[in-house]
Image: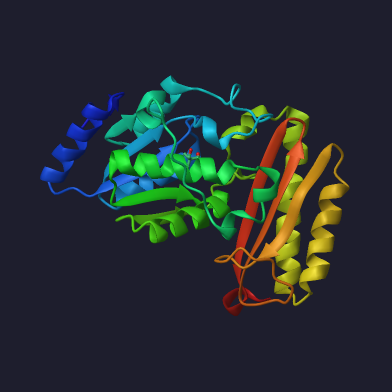
């Protein structure tokens, strides 16, 4: 079945109703476009699950802060459509602004303490914007399963909590981070990197894997964090938002090593902000 590009809520609802009457589960991949192999892996996960697969593209203004990159966020609809088509998604939903934020819109979904750490303090209001738009998109699409990339681990944790707290009838599936061969996590924002910045951006993954290896070797959390910070700070032109070892569920920083951990960091290079994380389970992968 060829990809259908849907730009109205009525058209979306009738496509979803047809899929439901054919007993299909609805798999949903919300995106802001500028699709890459990371998004492709989410579409493939939905297809593997046998879902009627809907991808949305909406560059959501409420999750960008005043100095953020809303205006220059890459908008590549034709290329995105080709990716969705090649990956055999059934629907590409491209809502209009008013479909998501109707005239007079007032309601916001405010996340709890999961949004307080990691990226939270550096992007005030960001996760409220994410929760609000994702709740609206879930209301529009009414999926059975929604697929997100583990690169945005804090976003995934917050959305899982929102789904639980607001009793939304769907399952959240987190898919592994897709990386370039040298380790850089794929992100639509990588397009902002000049060749020299692209080379230096690797310090983030290198720092996180250094931290992971130290923890695996039995070194302390403090020493791992110090070594990661040192690795980042000695890279010219890089400023560090944070580097941290946290519990992967609560996202609380840990001071003592425990079995499941997430090593996470965020840096800025030029005008580009990059995040990444590495999950570890010391009960199975201690050296
Ligand atoms: O991860 C993203 O691309 C966005 O935060 C999302 C989930 C599509 C909401 O705008």
Q: Is residue 183 visible?
A: no
Write the residue at 66% across / 28% down.
192
Q: Is residue 286 visible?
A: yes
For residue 5, side relative to residue 111 (left or right): left
209 displayed left or right of 278: right
Which residue is located at x 41 percent, y 46 percent? 42
Q: Residue at x 29, y 56 (%)?
A: 169
Q: Is residue 53 left or right of residue 159?
A: left
Q: Is residue 80 above or below residue 225?
A: above
**172 in relation to 213, above or below:** above
Q: Position of residue 102 (x, y in %)?
A: 37, 28
Q: x and y percent of residue 135 in the render?
A: 40, 45
Figure quadrant of the N terminus: top left
Residue at image coords 28%, 45%: 142
Pinpoint residue 165: horizontal percent, then vertical percent.
Answer: 41, 60
Quadrant for residue 113, please give it: bottom right
Compare residues 148 and 3 and report the one nearer the observer: 148
């Amino acid at each position: 079945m060829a990809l259908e590009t849907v730009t109205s809520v009525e058209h979306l609802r009738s496509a979803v109703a047809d899929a439901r009457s054919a007993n299909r589960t609805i798999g949903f991949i919300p995106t802001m476009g500028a699709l890459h192999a990371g998004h492709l892996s989410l579409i493939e996960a939905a297809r593997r699950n046998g879902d009627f697969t809907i991808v949305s593209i909406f560059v959501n203004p409420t999750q960008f802060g005043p100095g953020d990159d809303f205006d220059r966020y890459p908008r590549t609809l034709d290329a995105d459509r080709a990716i969705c088509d090649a990956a055999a998604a059934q629907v590409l939903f491209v809502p209009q602004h008013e479909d998501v934020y109707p005239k007079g819109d007032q309601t916001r979904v405010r996340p709890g303490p999961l949004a307080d750490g990691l990226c939270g303090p550096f992007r005030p209001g960001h996760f409220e914007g994410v929760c609000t738009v994702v709740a609206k998109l879930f209301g529009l699409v009414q999926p059975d399963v929604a697929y997100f990339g583990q690169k945005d681990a804090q976003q995934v944790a917050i959305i899982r909590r929102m789904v639980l707290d607001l009793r939304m009838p769907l399952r959240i599936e987190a898919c592994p981070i897709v990386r370039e061969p040298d380790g850089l996590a794929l992100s639509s924002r990588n397009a902002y990197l000049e060749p020299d910045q692209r080379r230096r951006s690797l310090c983030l993954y290198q720092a996180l894997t250094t931290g992971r290896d130290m923890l695996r070797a039995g070194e302390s959390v403090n020493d791992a964090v110090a070594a990661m910070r040192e690795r980042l700070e000695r890279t010219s032109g890089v400023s560090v938002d944070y580097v941290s070892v946290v519990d992967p569920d609560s996202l609380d920083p840990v001071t003592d090593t425990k079995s499941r951990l997430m090593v996470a960091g965020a840096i800025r290079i030029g005008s580009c902000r990059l995040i990444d994380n590495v999950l570890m389970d010391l009960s199975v992968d201690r050296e």
